Image (cartoon, coloured by chain):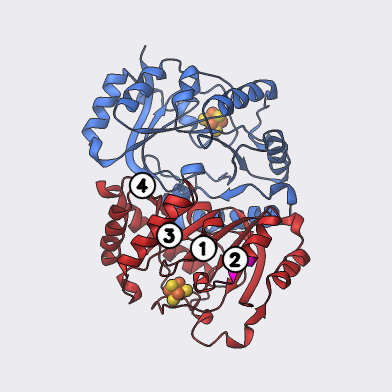
Chain colours: A blue, B red
Amino acid sequence: MRIPVLEIFGPTIQGEGAVIGKKTVFIRTAGCDYQCSWCDSAFTWDGTGKDDIRLMTAVEIIDELKEIGLENFQHVTISGGNPALLKQLGELVDSLKNLQMKIGLETQGTVWQAWMLRIDDLTISPKPPSSGMNTDFEKLDGLVESLTKRIGEGHVSLKVVIFDEGDLAYAKRVHQKYPTVPFYLQVGNDDLTVDDDEQLSIKLLKKLDWLVSKVIIDPEFNQVRVLPQLHALLWGNKKGV
Amino acid sequence: MRIPVLEIFGPTIQGEGAVIGKKTVFIRTAGCDYQCSWCDSAFTWDGTGKDDIRLMTAVEIIDELKEIGLENFQHVTISGGNPALLKQLGELVDSLKNLQMKIGLETQGTVWQAWMLRIDDLTISPKPPSSGMNTDFEKLDGLVESLTKRIGEGHVSLKVVIFDEGDLAYAKRVHQKYPTVPFYLQVGNDDLTVDDDEQLSIKLLKKLDWLVSKVIIDPEFNQVRVLPQLHALLWGNKKGV
Ligand code: SF4
Ligand code: SF4
């Protein structure tokens, strides 16, 4: 089965989460079962990117990575949308493994796929109230439990994007449910149209400052890590960098 | 033996390196065997902080941490100066361990101490040519070898601060010598006097952009991670935050 691909770009650096700063190539798949109010990749599911979707085989994707030059990177990040919707990613995961690539993947945690066990850096990013979505905690429990039991230490992390106090309360609940899973709080970017990069950077840094100020006074957050999105700080809302 | 302490502050977040974003309390010790041209904590060794040095026992330091509130953090970072000059840190390290604290420590790698084996996040940060210092690679070899062999995976990392092309060439050499040790490239801040935080942030982000652009085209840097200093982005050159 073919994979709906919206973008392949890089090498660039991973801007967020557990492997922040790592050189990687992004493969962005189309389609999502959520519609978060502040989604920064809504073009993967709202129809606006429809004409850019290519239905590719794993072999075609690997060919495109070869054109980038396999010697130029050792890490590939599969993002979306929600790539966990795609059962057929298993073949791509295997092909990447055969090339000695490390693989990162992010999903909001609604769907389980067997190939997840072969991901090196798997980020589960359940969506807080400001997204407008409701978390099915039963499904999330199942996913987190299977993964942490079977994939091994250091390969799974949780990440919650924070826009407001309600999101922080939600994040605390998630962190308390899975206290041993590495937990990242990420500054939300709700200004997806501004094209003055410097102005956006300053705004995002102010939000980071706010988030840090909340975390450092709260003993429940002693173990979390607070991070910005480096790509947003560096390149604003540009796509494909 | 007492420990020369210059600052105890936090909780705040660790702004750099392997545990970037983690809540921590800093203990800054006085004294360094280097005099880096761009040292951002020169007050620890150039005499300007002399009157602020307190000679403290491990017990007194722990008492001060208790005043901050031990329930408010689970990570302590010992920085300098070069804390590795202080054999007497062993007692403090043990006391922190007894309190279930995780311990981070940064040193440029000139001196070995037995207590290093009990550090959870040890960053060795050899100094590139722009610092004006010369690396004794024989000593560094010995330190990296002992540590990586004995302290176990995931507890040691290397970090090089980058100001220019010469520093990048140096970093590459260090990375090639110890290819299995997690390696971080950090944007250098050579503007230690500017007090316009926003202006400094924009400047540092431009440097990060430059560093990223160098790393992503160089296959020798496939495994490194590129990071800014979050505290400099957030709070500029202020001390004690
Ligand atoms: S889950 Fe992710 S891709 Fe899907 S709508 Fe939400 S933010 Fe966008
Ligand atoms: S080794 Fe560190 S503390 Fe010592 S002079 Fe250099 S930058 Fe400053």
Query: Which residues, given as a range, are shown in magenta?
Result: B87-91
Spot occupied by residue B158 in the image (x, y as percentages of width and height): 41, 57
Mark 2 vs 1: CB contact within 8 A:
yes
- State how many labels appear: 4
What is the three-letter code of the residue carrying label 1?
Answer: Ala
Q: Which mark is residue B180?
A: 4
* Earlier-in-chain disc, 2 versus 1: 2
Q: Which residue is mark 3?
A: B205
Q: Which mark is residue B85?
A: none
Residue B240: in magenta span: no
Q: Which mark is residue B90?
A: 2
- Please report the residue visible at 68 percent of the width from the left and 50 percent of the height from the top: A222
Query: Residue B210 sits in which quadrant?
Result: bottom left
Q: Residues within 10 Å of mark 1 (few under 14, many from 20)?
A: few
Does dot 2 land on a helix, a strand or a loop?
helix
Q: Which residue is mark 1?
A: B114
* Earlier-in-chain disc, 4 versus 3: 4
* Earlier-in-chain disc, 4 versus 2: 2
